Amino acid sequence: MAVVREFTLPDLGEGLTEATIVQWMVEIGEVVSVDQPVVEVETAKAMVEVPCPYGGVVTARFGDEGTDLPVGAPLITVAVGASSSVAEPADLSPDAAPEAAPAAEETVPAESGEGSGNVLVGYGTSAAAARRRRVRPGGATRSGSTADGSAAARPETAAPEEPRDPEESDASRTVAVISPLVRRMAREHGLDLATLRGTGRHGLILRTDVERAVRERQAPAVTAPAGPVVADAGRARAEGERIPLRGMRGAAAEKFSRSRREIPDATCWVDADATELLAARRAMNAPGAPKVSLLALLARICTAALARFPELNATIDTETQEIVRLPEVHLGFAAQTDRGLVVPVVRDAHTRTVEGLSAEIARLTESARSGGLSLADLTRGTFTLNNYGVFGVDGSTPIINHPEAAMLGVGRISPKPWVHDGELAVRQVVQLSFTFDHRVCDGGTSGGFLRYVADCVEQPAVLLRGL
C-alpha cells in the first residue's frame, strides 16, 4: 500500500527564509525518482532546482508559478510505493483513508534502503526518523490535500507558530514569523510581534513589516489631511509602474542599504597608464595559447596587492567589535545579468594563475547569464573587483559588498594625452577607484594598496617581484 509523503521547501542555506516558484518540473500524477528535481525556485541568491528526497507518484503541488513560499511550507506530496503505471491511484485519495478521530495521528516510518542524500541543507531521508502527520476529520491531511489531488497550503503549515507565553490568554493571536532576524529586530526595538500584521504569504511577518512598525513608532504624530487631499494621495499612489523588490534584486537592494548604514566607507582614486598592460595581454594571447582576459589580469594584480596589504582582506565582527583578517582570498567580480547585478566569487583566487583566473571568470560569467549559478558561487567573498568600464564610464564610487572591507573599481580604458618619458603622448589611460572600510585601515594603507595596483597596471613587470 502506498504511503503519502509530504515534501516541504528545504533550508536553502545562507539564512534564506523564502523562495519564489519559477517553474514546476513535474505534473500531478507523474512518477518521480529519489533526488529528481521537481521545481525551480528563485531565492535572494540564485536560481535553484530543488530535488525531492522521495520516489513515487506526485499527488499534489502547492503554489502556482510566481508564488512566494517560506522555508518549511509544503511543495508537493508523493505517494511512495505506488505503481508507476497508475497516474492517479484511487487508494491515494485521503478520503479513502480509514476513518480517524479528529486528533488522530498516523506514524509514517522512514523507508529503508531508498534514502536520499543530503542534497540541500537540512534534509535527506537516508537517516530520517519516523514522522507524524495529522489526520483531520473527513480524511484531510495536515497539508490540505483533497481527493482530486489539488491542494492549498494551510496557514499552519506555511509558517511555524510563535511559541506562546504561558501568561498570555488563549485569545492571543498566533504569530506567523520564521526568520530569526525578524525576531531579533523586534526584540531590540521592543516590539510585540503579536501586534503586527504580516504582509507575507498567510500573514507571515517579514523584516519590512518590523522596519515599518519601527518607523511608524518613531515618526511624530501628523494630523490627518482633509478628504479631497486623501483622495488625491490615493490616486498618486496608484500611478506608475510598480516593480517588487524581491528575489535577487531585492537582496541586492538590501545589501546596498546595509552597506551604507553600517560601513564608514571612503574612496580614493588615481589615473594610470594601461598601455603596457594591454601590450602584455596581447603577448599572452599569442596564437595557440589559452586566452587571457583583461579582468583576469586585474584579478591577479588584486591578489598580489592583497598579499602586500592583508588587512584589506578582512571583515568586521560587529558583535565582538573585532577586525577579522581572512587567510584566503575569495575574489568576487560584479556581473550584470537580465535579473540584475550579481557578484560571482572565484574561490581561492590567490592560488590561481592568470590563465586559471581567466578560465574560472569565464565559467562563472556564463553561468551568471544563464541563471545557473549555485549558492556556493555567490557567497563568502572576501574582496570584490568591479569593472564598470564595460558601461563606458571613467569613474565611480562603488558601494562595498557587505560584509567585505574593500572594493576596487576599474573604469574604461581610453586614449588620452599623457606625459610619457618626459614627452606628451597619446596613451591608454584608466581610472582606478578604491573604496574601503575606514574601520579596518587608514588612508596610508588604502593609498599604498591603490598605488601598488596602479604601478602593476603601468609596469606589469612589477608583479615579477613577488613571484
Image (cartoon, rainbow, N blue to C red):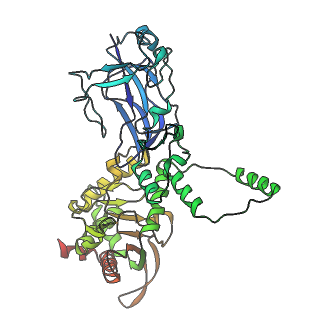
Q: Is residue 337 visible?
A: no
Q: Residue at x 29, y 53 (%)?
A: 359
Q: Residue at x 24, y 77 (%)?
A: 462
Q: Nearer the viewer, residue 115 or 33?
A: 115
Find residue 406 and report its image quarter: bottom left
Q: Residue at x 38, y 73 (%)?
A: 436
Residue furthest to the right in view is: 228
| Residue 261 on image: x %, y % | 46, 67
| Residue 121 on image: x %, y % | 30, 40
Q: Is residue 372 visible?
A: yes
Name above or below for residue 422 compared with residue 427.
below
Q: Residue at x 22, y 59 (%)?
A: 352
| Residue 52 on image: x %, y % | 35, 29
Q: Nearer the viewer, residue 39 or 319?
A: 319
Name above or below for residue 425 compared with residue 227.
below
Please give left or right for residue 306 compared with residue 338 in the image: left
Q: Nearer the viewer, residue 398 or 352?
A: 398
Name above or below for residue 277 compared with residue 249.
below
| Residue 84 on image: x %, y % | 35, 12
**Quadrant where the C terminus lies?**
bottom left
**Quadrant where the N terminus lies?**
top left
Please give left or right for residue 445 compared with residue 392 in the image: left
Name above or below for residue 110 compared with residue 90.
below
Residue furthest to the left in view is: 467
